Amino acid sequence: MTGGALTEDEKTEIRRFCGYAALGDVASGESSWRFFQNVGALEWRLNTLAGSERKRLRYFLATLLQMERAVQSVSENLDTQAVSVWTRNTRELSERVRLFDWWRRRVCGFLGVMPGPDLRDYASVVV
């Protein structure tokens, strides 16, 4: 599906990758997006993208899903320090996570929304 409206599954993954929490069931009338400006902006963007923008967003989504799987697979080699001439990159996990989060922030930038709480840098102080 390249040109049609985003599916609910795609929207869920995009929200997650942009660092936002689950919205809840819209049918219940209790979904939280109405109460938070940034989440509302994201929802508006997801529902009003042009066909070419949805196509690009689907590219980002496919890339992020692949990168997330790569981060998850790093754990398969965490117990190995060296094998013959191969030596594990001890920074692999942190490097993959940093690259993965960089791509997640690119999606936020593409959509014109602030990164959600999951992507906030808690080491920095905003005054």
Image (spheres, rainbow, N blue to C red):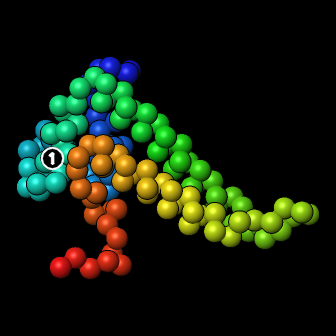
Q: Which residue in the structure is indicated by mark 1? A: 41
Residue under the point 36% across and 27% down: 55
Looking at the picture, does residue 117 appear above or below residue 57?
Answer: below
Foreground residue, 82 or 95?
A: 95
The quadrant of the picture occupied by the C terminus is bottom left
Asked whether, in this view, residue 24 is left or right of residue 28, the answer is right
Picture coordinates of residue 17, whole percent (x, y): 37, 50
Q: Residues within 10 Å of mark 1 (few under 14, many from 20)?
A: some
The quadrant of the picture occupied by the N terminus is top left
Examine the image and state in which quarter residue 117 appears: bottom left
Picture coordinates of residue 64, whole percent (x, y): 46, 45
Identify which amino acid the numbered label 1 is placed on: Ala
Picture coordinates of residue 100, whole percent (x, y): 48, 54
Looking at the picture, does residue 107 appear above or below residue 93?
Answer: above
Residue under the point 33% across and 62% down: 118
Asked whether, in this view, residue 89 is left or right of residue 12, the answer is right
Looking at the picture, does residue 21 appear above or below residue 29?
Answer: below
Examine the image and state in which quarter residue 110 appears: top left
Picture coordinates of residue 65, whole percent (x, y): 48, 43
Foreground residue, 23 or 103?
A: 103
